[in-house]
Amino acid sequence: MKKVLKSAAWTLVALVVAAGVCFRLLAPARVGAVTPQRGLVVEEVFGTGTLEAKVVVAVSTKITGKVTTVLVDQGDTVTNGQVVARLEATDYEHSVRVAEAALGQAQAELAKAKLDLARNRDLLRDHTISQAEFDTADTSYRVAEAKIKSAEANLGFARARLADTVIHSPVAGLALVRNLEVGDTVVPGTPIFRVADTQVLWVQAMVDEREAGKLGVGQPARITFRADHGRSFPGRLVRLAREADRVTEEREADVIVDHLPRDWFIGAKANVYIETARRADALQLPASAIVRRGDQPGVFVVNSGRAHWRPVRLGLTGRDTVELAGGVEAREVVIANPFAGKKPVADGQRVAAPGAKEQPCDHP
């Protein structure tokens, strides 16, 4: 009797173990499932870039000089023509005074030469002097006129040099860089400020050249800034480069931002999504449901408790969804993410999905 009981106990243990093995090894894998739904699909081309000013001007001096005053700091807003710095002007002021004195002297000489010429003209008419003497007076007058022009030019040059000691911003915008301090000596051609014209700010984004063929100037876009917690800002594509980067195989797409975030700054990292097409009533699935075999897209359809890979035709590709142009009906159950589990779903595998009927444990 004891042997019979013992044998029955071992048989029960074996059955329990077998049931456990069946449950663990042959039980259907639980997966998330969806049915195709109709709704809006917006196709976009993605790119990354930075916020830049269309025009950035390097401000430099026309003369060599020592800086006496700096009126603008990095990050300040400036207006067109605003004084940003001054150079030592003592020598140039002296040159102006010398030129003014030379012009005064030339004017006095011209006045005397004019009187002499008038007097000699009367004398020549009365035959009191010779023609040669009159010609000498006329020449003196013309020389005096030439001296006036020379003195005026010298004065203009001296005043221009003096004016060059005052440095103005050529555009209205934002001072990005300041490269001088009081006491520094600056030379022509060396940038001392960089000023960005803030009238046109755009994101210079790089997009895959394989996607760039879908782009056209004027297309709407949305922009997200890394520093602004993912908020979207509307914009539009205003320029598409005609040359691609030969290393990265990308083209530059310049996107105007209609309304910048309050705390914008030049160089801010941004993502752009340029809209290339949309369809309001498209049959669609999550993009995660698509499983490609080579170049052929497909999905796993749940039928009789098993997953069956089926090729499909795709239409527009949205941010998170894709349009189904054929291959799956609206009522069918599709695995939402075949790669979500420890192992990818395989063709013919038993699965348990919402809306799909489970089968008893059997061999696959």
Image (cartoon, rainbow, N blue to C red):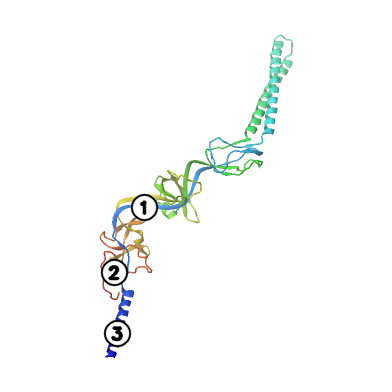
Please report contact status of discs 3 and 2: CB closer than 8 Å, yes or no.
no
The x, y position of residue 279, in whole percent, is 32, 51
Under circle 3, the secondary element is helix
**Does the image show residue 239?**
no
Q: Amino acid at mark 2?
A: Arg
The x, y position of residue 109, in whole percent, is 71, 20
**Within 10 Å of the Cα at label 1, are there few (<14), some (14-19), or many (20+) other Cα atoms?**
many
Q: CA distance from mark 3 to mark 2?
A: 36 Å
Q: CA distance from mark 2 to mark 1?
A: 32 Å
Q: Nearer the viewer, mark 2 or mark 1?
A: 2
Q: CA distance from mark 3 to mark 1?
A: 64 Å
Return the residue nearer the eye: 336 or 241. 336
Could you tell which of marks 3 and 1 lies nearer the N-terminus? 3
Could you tell which of marks 3 and 2 lies nearer the N-terminus? 3
Under circle 1, the secondary element is strand
Q: Where, quadrant-wise, is the C terminus in this rendering?
A: bottom left
Q: Amino acid at mark 1?
A: Glu
- Which mark is drawn over residue 43? 1
Under circle 2, the secondary element is strand
From what the image shows, is residue 234 above or below residue 343?
above
Instruction: Tell me: 178 left or right of 358.
Output: right
Return the residue nearer the eye: 11 or 30. 11
Q: Amino acid at mark 3?
A: Ala
In the rendered image, which residue does mark 3 sit on? 9
The x, y position of residue 86, in whole percent, is 62, 36
Instruction: Tell me: 208 left or right of 21.
Output: right
Query: Which residue corresponds to the image point at 73% horizontal and 18% vertical from the top-left?
Result: 136
In the rendered image, which residue does mark 2 sit on? 306
Could you tell which of marks 2 and 1 lies nearer the N-terminus? 1
**Does the image show residue 108?**
yes
Instruction: Tell me: 65 left or right of 275.
Output: right
The x, y position of residue 257, in whole percent, is 44, 45
